[in-house]
Image: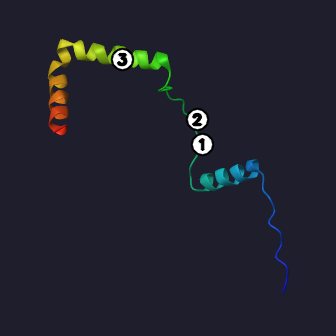
Amino acid sequence: MPKAKPATKRSSRDKVRAHRARLRKQGLRPIQMWVPDLGADAYRAEIRQQCLAIADSPREKEDQDFVAALLARNSM
């Protein structure tokens, strides 16, 4: 019985390169996207400030009442 060839180990770099090549053949291209760090204190503070501003805005009262009604209905 013939011996099986030992599997050659490919480096992580080679695996990533091959994976990216397959994706490019599918018509895709890589991009880099930066998103906010949801755990950052500064981000949370900014979101809280914006939410409070919306909640306190008389122009948004109708929308806020609608959301509150939905939440009340779904919590039953």
Residue furthest out toward the front: 76
Q: Can you say which quadrant of the picture contains the N terminus?
A: bottom right
Q: Amino acid at mark 1?
A: Pro
Residue 20 against residue 57 in the figure, above or below: below
- Is residue 40 rendered to the left or right of residue 57? right
- The numbered dot on residue 48 is 3
Query: Is residue 41 shown left or right of residue 55?
Result: right
Q: Cβ–Cβ below 8 Å for labels 3 and 1? A: no
**Which residue in the protein does label 1 denote?**
30
Which residue sits at x=48%, y=18%? Answer: 41
Locate residue 30, reporting x and y percent: 60, 42
Task: Say which amino acid is labelled 3.
Answer: Arg
Looking at the rendered structure, the secondary structure element under dot 3 is helix
Query: For this view, does 30 lie left or right of residue 61?
Result: right
CA distance separating discs 2 and 3: 28 Å
Q: Residue at x 14, y 30 (%)?
A: 69
Q: Quadrant of the C terminus?
A: top left
The image quadrant that residue 75 belongs to is top left
Do callouts 2 and 1 mark residues in contact (Cβ within 8 Å)? yes
The image shows residue 24 at horizontal and vertical percentages of: 62, 51
Describe the element under mark 2 as helix, strand or loop.
loop
Spot occupied by residue 45 in the image (x, y as percentages of width and height) = 42, 15
Q: Residue under circle 2? A: 32
Q: Nearer the viewer, residue 74 or 51?
A: 74
Where disc 1 sits, the SS reads: loop
The residue depicted at 19 percent of the width and 29 percent of the height is 67
From what the image shows, is residue 17 above or below residue 35? below
Q: CA distance from mark 2 to mark 1?
A: 7 Å
